[in-house]
Amino acid sequence: MVRAFYIGRFQPYHFGHHAIIKQIAEEVDELVVGIGSAQKSHESTDPFTAGERVLMLYNALENLPIRHYVLPIEDVRYNSIWVHHVASRTPNFQVVYSNNPLVIQLFREAGFCVKESPLYIRERYSGTEIRRRMVAGEKWEHLVPKSVVEVIKEIDGVNRLRNVSASDSNSSL
């Protein structure tokens, strides 16, 4: 049995993530999905809580054909212990999927098999672009699974993002 690990911030979870996870599911028996920077929320780059992101993924992965786990992973400021930190919070896994150069380096140094997954239409499916659209009042719903739209609407996530992205500076002073 092969269990894989895939980590992302999922701010929010979108079809790019979904395409990668579906591809990983074809190659392994089980998947551990780590929600990175789990301690962050209510910021312009990290508007959603770990619990909200768990719900997004839980609902979006409901029909994934393999057993999967979705777990929050808090940041550790020491890269030399980060892999141990992740491993201590997850079921054992044999292979790591990532596109992040630091994540790839750290897991390879720790002796893990690391596979780079191709980015899926990155110019369209990007958390940065989706959050920009939300703040600007542009259409974003078509870039995420319907279940993610429902979570964001339930928590009034667009208004939260707009509020935390607003500036408190007064340019007329």
Image: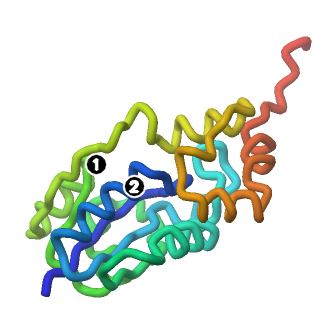
Q: Position of residue 115 (x, y in %)?
A: 14, 58
Quarter of the image where one finds residue 95: bottom left
Position of 38 with respect to 168 (left or right) is left
Q: Which mark is residue 17?
A: 2
Residue type for callout 2:
His
Counting residues from the start of the chain, the first of labels 1 and 2 encountered is: 2
Position of 137 with respect to 11 (left or right) is right
Front residue of 71 and 110: 71
Q: Quadrant of the N terminus?
A: bottom left
Give the residue at mark 1: 100
Q: Relative to residue 89, is residue 77 depicted above or below?
A: above
Instruction: Assess disc 2: are there few (<14), some (14-19) or many (≥20) residues with their C-alpha within 10 Å of its C-alpha.
Output: many
Spatial CA distance of label 1 from label 2 is 13 Å
Q: Relative to residue 82, is residue 45 depicted above or below?
A: above
User: Could you say whether the residue bearing mark 1 is in a helix, strand or loop?
Assistant: loop
Front residue of 62 and 95: 62
Position of 77 with respect to 108 (left or right) is right
Count of residue discs: 2
Of badges 1 and 2, nearer the viewer stands: 2
Q: Residue furthest top?
A: 172
Residue type for callout 1:
Asn
Quarter of the image where one finds residue 163: top right
Instruction: Assess disc 1: are there few (<14), some (14-19) or many (≥20) residues with their C-alpha within 10 Å of its C-alpha.
Output: few
Q: Position of residue 59 (x, y in %)?
A: 55, 73
The residue located at (18%, 52%) in the rendering is 116
